[in-house]
Image (cartoon, rainbow, N blue to C red):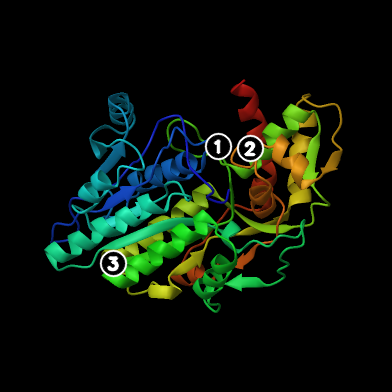
Amino acid sequence: MDPLGASNALGDNIILRRVAFSSREQQATYKFAFNSASSTTLTFNTGGTILTHLLKSDNPALKNAIITCLVRGEQRISQLEKAYGSRVKAELYQDLDDVERTIEVTSQHDYVINTTLGFHPESAAALVKGLAKRKQSTGKDTFMIHTSGTSNLADQPITGKLLEDRVFDDAKDDIYGYEKEREKGQLYLQRNSELGVVDAGIETGVKVLVIMSPTIYGRGSGIGNTSSIQVPAYVKTTLASGQGVVVGEGKGIWDNVHVEDLAGLYELVLLNQIQANGSDLPTGKKAIIFSGNGRHTWGELAAGVAQAAYQAGQIKTAEVKSVTIEEAANLWPAPWNEPLRVELGLSSNSRTESTVGRQLGWKPSRSAEAWKDGFTEEVKAALEQK
């Protein structure tokens, strides 16, 4: 699930606060947004899983962490308190456009993990501004982990506007420079948001690190919606169409990662920021890392979903039909109901090597079997939601 957006059953922004570490008092902000106006589910699946993962951590730096959640609506406060008790504290704000409130809350913290809407540059920039104020007032370093997605690097093989056959390595390649050049030719808000955060971090001295994720799969462990985005999109389209579908020949290749493995990478990065002042992490324009573990073609994904739906008795054939990009934009749910997003996020090539994470000690454990099992899980989840 490439981070193309964020919505969920619970609501809006959630922020994490640490209150104590080692011998000195520190605070950390964990921000991930639940935007009920959006139609995608990245944030709640990924952000909720990361939240749960950190709350369950037995590392001394995290085991007593208190999470401050920036949310919309009083009812969401009780939901969070019921699920997480005293480990979570809620702060109200209006929505992602409420940048003044976001800056206010963030300025009281030293660490931010942002898994909110990837297509909202203003809210991401507000986090850096808040951390810059914190750094200015305390004289101490502040840190931000920003969530982005590998559709930022994707080519356009269906329309033929851009063909890319390289495999990007976060330890060797100039990802920032490549994205800058891409952005000059085509505005893509998720990429624009990411680059803006990196630039703002360089300008203010806030230590920003971007985790750029591919297709995220697997059921999340947070409360509310625990689905991801790309595989469920294929599931919904398959069930609605009565047959599996893929754009073109489905030859585009992407990486994937299980949501629980991804949460482990976030914890690893956060701990390095807390315990080693981020000394082992890339900085500045090099601070963009990947999180891929497996690899698939879109044709394989479509076939896996179709087979799972067929075995569940929901469609009459396991065969997958090819559709045009325009047809796909009419078939797929938002935010995939635009030709550009269909091409970049559901039918392109975007291959990466997660070298930096592995050098840090990241050891994703979910195999190709877990990827295949995910199709059955998402079909079952979709049927339960009917």
What label does residue 206 carry, if any? Answer: 3
| Element carrying mark 2 | helix
- Marks 3 and 2 close (CB-CB < 8 Å): no
Quadrant location, the C terminus: top right
x then y, percent, for residue 137: 12, 62
Q: Is residue 242 visible?
A: yes
| Element carrying mark 3 | loop
Q: Amino acid at mark 1?
A: Ser
In primary-sequence order, the first of circles 3 and 1 is 3
Q: Nearer the viewer, mark 3 or mark 1?
A: 3
In primary-sequence order, the first of circles 3 and 2 is 3
Q: Nearer the viewer, mark 3 or mark 2?
A: 3
For marks 3 and 1, give the CA distance: 32 Å
Determine whether, in the image, residue 258 is placed left or right of residue 11.
right
Q: Amino acid at mark 3?
A: Val
What label does residue 227 carry, if any? Answer: 1
